[in-house]
Amino acid sequence: MKHFLIFALKSVCYDSYLYFSDALSKALAAAGHSVEIFSAQKEPPEAMERFAGQTFDAVFDFNSALPRLRMEEGGYFADQINAPFYNIILDHPLYHHDSLKQTLSDYHVLCLDKNHRDYVLSYYPHIASADIFSVTGEDILPQDPSYPEKQIDVLFSGTYTDYREIESSIGSAPSFLGNITKQLIELMQKNNSLTQEAALRFLTPSFEESEIIEETFPLHMQACFLCDSYLRARKREELLLFLAKKNVPLTLCGNGWRKSPLAHFSNVRIIDDISFWDTFLLFRKSKITLNLLPEFKNGTHDRIYSSILNHSLCLTDSSPLLESQLKDNRELIYYDTQNPDRLTGQIFDLLSSPKRMEEISQNGYFCAKESHSWQSRAAYLLTLI
């Protein structure tokens, strides 16, 4: 039996971090291991000091800020715990540079995307290991494997951000930084397969020699984070706006949609913020869950597994990693973001073919129950420890 410590320190993103920590804890415990979880909702931060000097087989945290925490007498707090520290990052590593650059004695990183893993290995040589870890979701009614009744045609779950506000922030940035960010956006819009790091690499020769050097590349990536934010926000709004104009029946769940251009369409229903757990019930009620990967060129997202674990047909853009896990037209359906007209046709064809929708949904459900549950994720994690 192994002994693990999991931190649950953040409550942003609809409490998703707290859910992930709790779900991982339960899966490891169900596998016969001892798990202690520290929740910032239940205890003050200073209570973490009790773990100093204790020994665990591993310590986990999601999008962790713990690597930046230092003791008053010097040294990293995480190094006071006798255990390898695993930071499970849910975004591009550029958002976590301040945590990743810390030189903990036994620092490991888990990523949602193979490109993110390679980025960590390339630019943070002090990181002991970096691997892939696809965060998953929950079957809200595991005792009932039958196909449920559906009340929602097409669900999109996610936050709305106005890309025009991001564009304004880019415009008000220092000229050098603003210009780089604009060039990155233009290049990545022309070539949808480019990662931000590849785009910045491509542009580097056009800059003055002193402006970007190898040692500071991750810092420049972090400084250009608005490129990633802008592309995600714009692609999300433009795709959904296109579908709304084509009279696709959409249900949008997440913060901010009532302030979006989509709020004025009669075929668009908006559900105000709900808890992360309650989104699983929405998936169960939905015939189709539409997913758009957040600039993950070779990764996955928990929405995909959450939807298929709750008998919803997931319609998503693809990545090589995702295609290695789930088969097109059998366990889910992939679409091309560059061809929204074809996506519109795919949606209406599916809605007019309830038997086909049910068959793919159920295939996906049983595949996810076997290979993409938290239990399977915990088993995989144990092979990495």
Image (cartoon, grey):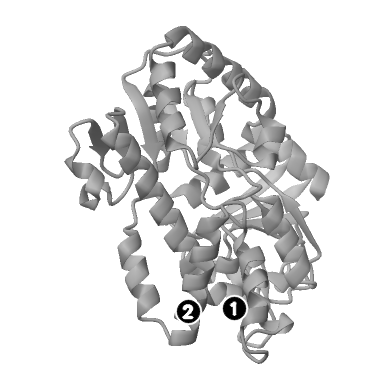
Depth check: give the residue in front, 228 or 346. Answer: 346
Depth check: give the residue in front, 346 or 228. Answer: 346
As drawn, the label of residue 179 is: 2
* Residue 98 picture quarter: bottom right
Give the image location of residue 222, x and y in percent: 56, 73
Secondary structure of the residue carrying numbered label 1: helix
Give the image location of residue 330, x and y in percent: 62, 19
Image point (74%, 44%), residue name: 381
Estimate how packed mark 1 is, as few (under 14), some (14 to 19) or many (20 or more) residues with alpha carbons within 10 Å.
Answer: some
Left or right, 184 with respect to 198, comes to: left
- Picture layout, residue 247 above or below residue 71: above
Left or right, 205 with respect to 233, comes to: right
Give the image location of residue 328, x and y in percent: 62, 25
Image point (39%, 17%), residue name: 351
- Picture layout, residue 349 above or below residue 195: above
Depth check: give the residue in front, 141 or 178. Answer: 178
N-terminal label among 2 and 1: 2
Quadrant assignment for the N terminus: top right
Residue 181 shows in the view = yes
- Picture layout, residue 93 above or below residue 335: below
- Picture layout, residue 178 above or below residue 142: below
Give the image location of residue 234, x and y in percent: 39, 55
User: Residues under labels 2 and 1: Cα distance?
Assistant: 13 Å
Secondary structure of the residue carrying numbered label 2: helix
* Residue 91 picture quarter: bottom right
Estimate how packed mark 2 is, as few (under 14), some (14 to 19) or many (20 or more) residues with alpha carbons within 10 Å.
Answer: some
As shown in the figure, which amino acid type bears the numbered disc 1? Answer: His
As drawn, the label of residue 220 is: 1
